[in-house]
Image: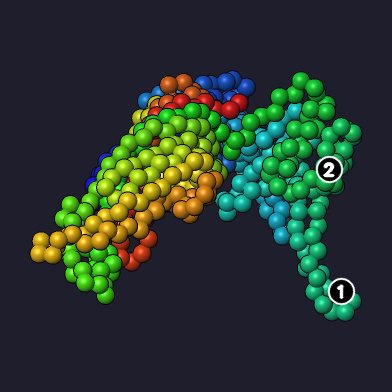
Amino acid sequence: MKKPFVLFVLVFLFLIPPAVSQRNLREKKGYIVIKRDTVYGVFDLSNFAEINRSVRFSRNEGSQFNNLTPKDIEAFKIDDYGVFIAEDSLTVSEAGRTTTEGPVFLESMQSGAMELFTYRSKFKKDFFFVRQGGKFFQLIREQKVIKGDDGASYRKVDEKYKGVLNVFFGDCKSAADPFAVRFRKNDLNEFAISYNKCKDVNFRPRMNRNQRIYVGVMGGLSLYSIRFTDLNRLATVVNQGTQYSGYPILDNYTSKKDSYAAFAFGLSTDFSVGRSPNVAVGLDLIYSGRSGLSEMYSFSYRMIEIPFYGKLMFALSKPFRPYLGVGLNAGIVVDRELLTKPVSLRSDSFGPSPAFFVPFNDGVGSSKGDHTTGAFRPFSLVGFDFFFKENQKIFVQARLESIDLSTSAYMDARMRLNSVFVGYSKRLE
């Protein structure tokens, strides 16, 4: 149990200092627009949280980054992240109060017959705007507290944004109904896409940066071991009240460890979360088969595993993205066989004792029947992505998992499962 834990800690300590020394930077290609001229270069996303007010840009990789504000450029585009435009001032309404902010950058969610924008204030709240006739109109949904004739207070939801959408974009019958649009980012974005497709059959929607989804295949090797400890405690209980009380268990069963290996393969998906480029979640589908045989037991099963995990990525060099993560693993057993074998106790003075069965489970569900569902099991992981092309990567991932196989307080048994996977994935366009 200690060796995998020590290995995990060493890898963690190996990754963290370089990542911190590099300030967790991530560089992305793109361009800026200055006086209608396009200048290509590289963006530093270490200050991504402030991207609505400033952005760091360099014309050449490896050169010093310059901090640019909406006063310096007209617009910019970061590959895989989106397009941002500069605006000198922006009127923002919230809870009946109106403030003017600027200069700022607004993110263009969709462009075409309907232009939809989002702006994140310095208080980390998103506001939505449409542009019509060169002017920005805010989409507003707010709750108001009003007093009735009986003196009681009531909450009223004022959905002004539906009226704005209907006035400007209610002229297309094949588009979504403006009054049926919910006040959520994805729903507003889908409405803009439907309206633009209605006006232009060749319209190509802009991919939102939150939709960076990678899908691929993976295969690997599972190295697992089963360790029994303190079996003498179990022997003591078995012998209580019999003439064989006190007989020790066979010496070679004490702290016994059996090791096995098995192949596994499946599908892998992962996608970025929120505005941070360094946080992602993954959901895999893995087919695995395991078997074991010893003096005390034999088991075999085939299983479909469904690991779900989150990971934190670091940028040590451009093509490599190492990461750490934790998750939960569940699965469905499709074929299973478990058999426990009789174990004999002995005494040098009195001869052999009667045989008994060591209670045992294989950690994948109940001991009867097929198609059982395994319990959720926590695991940790470490790995790296290698981007050999802009939207394609090869990944290597190691997972550390410990499964409790104990059946009572008198028998301690655990399965230590260490898996290594290699895979290929590509971003969905």
Q: Which picture quadrant has residue 205?
A: top right
| Residue drawn at x 69%, y 50% as measured from the top left | 92
Seen from the viewer's position, the closer of residues 322 and 22 is: 322
Task: Give percent across and percent down for residue 342.
Answer: 30, 54
Structural distance between the alpha carbons of marks 2 and 1: 30 Å
Q: Earlier in the sequence, mark 2 or mark 1?
A: 1
Residue drawn at the location 80% of the way across and 23% of the way down: 200
x, y percentage for residue 312? 42, 43
State which quarter of the image contains the C terminus: top right
Residue 252, image x, y percentages: 17, 52
Q: Are marks 2 and 1 in contact (CB under 8 Å)?
A: no
For the question of whether residue 22 can be seen, the reply is no
Compared to 357, does 284 lie above or below?
Answer: above
**Mark 1 residue type:** Gly
For mark 1, give the secondary structure. Answer: loop
| Location of residue 206 in the rendering, given as x and y in whole percent from the top left corner | 66, 29
The residue labelled by disc 1 is: 148
**99 left or right, relative to 58:** right
Q: Is residue 341 visible?
A: yes
Residue that carries the numbered disc 2 in the rendered image: 178
Label 2 SS: helix
Residue closest to the eye, 199 or 384: 384
Task: Report the amino acid beneath label 2.
Answer: Pro
Q: Which label sits on residue 52?
A: none
Relative to 342, is 424 on the left or the right? right
Residue 104, quarter of picture: top right
Judge the density around disc 2: few (<14), some (14-19), many (≥20) Cα neighbours within 10 Å.
many
